[in-house]
Amino acid sequence: MSSGFISKVALPLTLAVAAAFVSHASLSHFFQTTLDRVVVNGKFSEKMVLTTTTINSQGARKVSEEHFDGLKGSEKIRVGSGKHLFSTDKLIIEFELLDKLSDGETPKISYVNIYSMELIFPYAQDMIIGQHRLPDIFASKDFVDDSFGVLQIDSHSGKAVLESKVELVAPQHFSYLLLSVLIGLAVFLLVRHTQIKKFPAFSDLDLGRHISSTSEFNVINGLRGLAAILVLLSHTAPGFYGIHIGLALLFVLSGFLLSKSFVLDPDKIFKWRNVEQYLVKRLRRILPMYYLFIFMTFVVTLQLETALRHFLFIQAAGHLWPMTQIFSFYMLLPIVLVFSCALHKLNRFLPLLFLLIAIFVYIDLAEGWKPYYNGRFAIQFYFHAFLMGVLASYIHYGFLANSEGVSFAIKRYSLVFGMGTAVILLLTIAWAGPFTPPEVLKAYISDFRVKCALCAIIVVLMVNADRSWFAAIIGNWVFRSVGVVGFSFYLLHGLGMDIFTEFQEQILGIEAAARSWWFSLSAFIITYWMALIAYSYVERPFFGFRHQKT
């Protein structure tokens, strides 16, 4: 069997049949049992509350309460519940008196006389239940003997309760089968005419040979993917709180990568055309996806003032707080590079001295400066974290890569470099997570500045040991694939967590645990697939990599 037949016929057909089967099963299960609301036609002589509770097959429930006034005399009225739109395995209907009996008051007899009941199914035929069929559909201790449709209010609880005892499934409609076939056909056509290798998020994994060495490109993307995963695990995994090491690594990598081309060619920074190209590319890199996320999160929900503050980078709520940091650094980096590149032309060691001084001065003077608003508290500008990345770039591209003696030593002792990098990285992650560092180091390790310095060391070691065994581990396909879509992955990981949590509670009826490894894995899968789509069709069209070798 040829590979062409498998890719063009067998695989698309298999996936299409699977999609049609899953679609039909989902339509039959959820659509046939999805209850919109309940309407009761009857006579009620008191002020009451109609409470309807829908419970799905996994035990999840949705409750609706509606207050109404009964009418005196023989006139009947229609009472409707609120909207449920919920898959229903069991239905509980309660009629409750608003005016309860006080202690010592003589009980009075109250009745609910139901003439008919309508169960509204939005995706199937409605179910109309006459009063003679009520005992066949519902069980209740409050039915009055030999009087179909009449319930007596319990004098103590003030309630009369109906609980369904049969499966509430509306008749299946032929459109379910037709829609399932159409979904299968759509999957067949899309898979048949899609080349996975040309999918932007996957094709960009091979750009290393165009914009840098393949091994270095893989290592950088592996570190970026690892940082994004560390942030996700910090929100989902039990006992793991390594978010700061993940963010420190992301900040340092930004400074390292963005200053690379200017370190390799210091004259570039003194031409406005190059600076303009850099700024435009950076803005195209982050604004489309970020603004779309803000639009969907705040504009669609009509939080317009909050949206405006986010659009203008005045506020960054929740996990969005690094966006103000990234935007500010992107815009300020050329100013730093003007000084560092001018010094680099005089002596390649001067930029290292300049950046070290700048880092220490900034930390000393701006320690209490918090210009950004998170929605709950103010956040300082971690400019020093990005500067450490710029410093790492000068150490590697401005010194180590241009020194033949150092390059030879690195290649000769790549095993030592790999071991050293592995030890530093693993200990840094472990001490940020479930393990406690030695007491003598605890105060230092908890400092974000120390984490940034360690990340700068890790980046320099990794790109110099890019052909070592440890670089191959860091540059594995999973880390690299997350690294390529890392920006979207970070923006969307909170949404991925929320989607899985709601799926557990609403569809599966499982109370979601605050943290678990199952939660981590599920949130990762959901977030990754959303990031693939967002990167390929939102981010990628707005920017382009340089397709030339450096």
Image: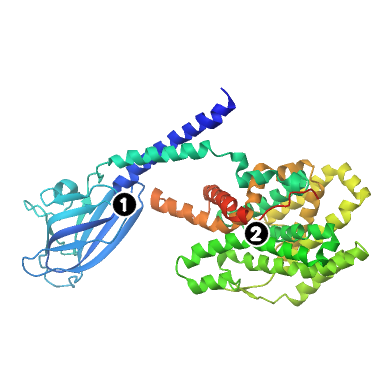
- On screen, residue 265 versus residue 539, left or right, reads right
Q: Position of residue 475 (x, y in %)?
A: 71, 44
Residue located at (79% from left, 56% from top): 457
Q: Nearer the viewer, residue 380 or 427?
A: 380
Q: Which mark is residue 55?
A: 1
Q: First in sequence: mark 1 or mark 2? A: 1
Q: Position of residue 322 (x, y in %)?
A: 63, 65
Count of all numbered marks drawn on residues in the image: 2
Up/down of 217 relative to 257, above or below: above
Q: Amino acid at mark 1?
A: Ile
For the N terminus, the quadrant is: top right
Q: Is residue 236 visible?
A: yes
- Residue bearing the label numbered 2: 285
Q: Quadrant of residue 362?
A: bottom right
Q: Amino acid at mark 2?
A: Arg
Q: Nearer the viewer, residue 202 or 27?
A: 202
Q: Position of residue 505 (x, y in %)?
A: 41, 53
Q: Position of residue 163 (x, y in %)?
A: 22, 52
Q: Nearer the viewer, residue 273 or 344?
A: 273
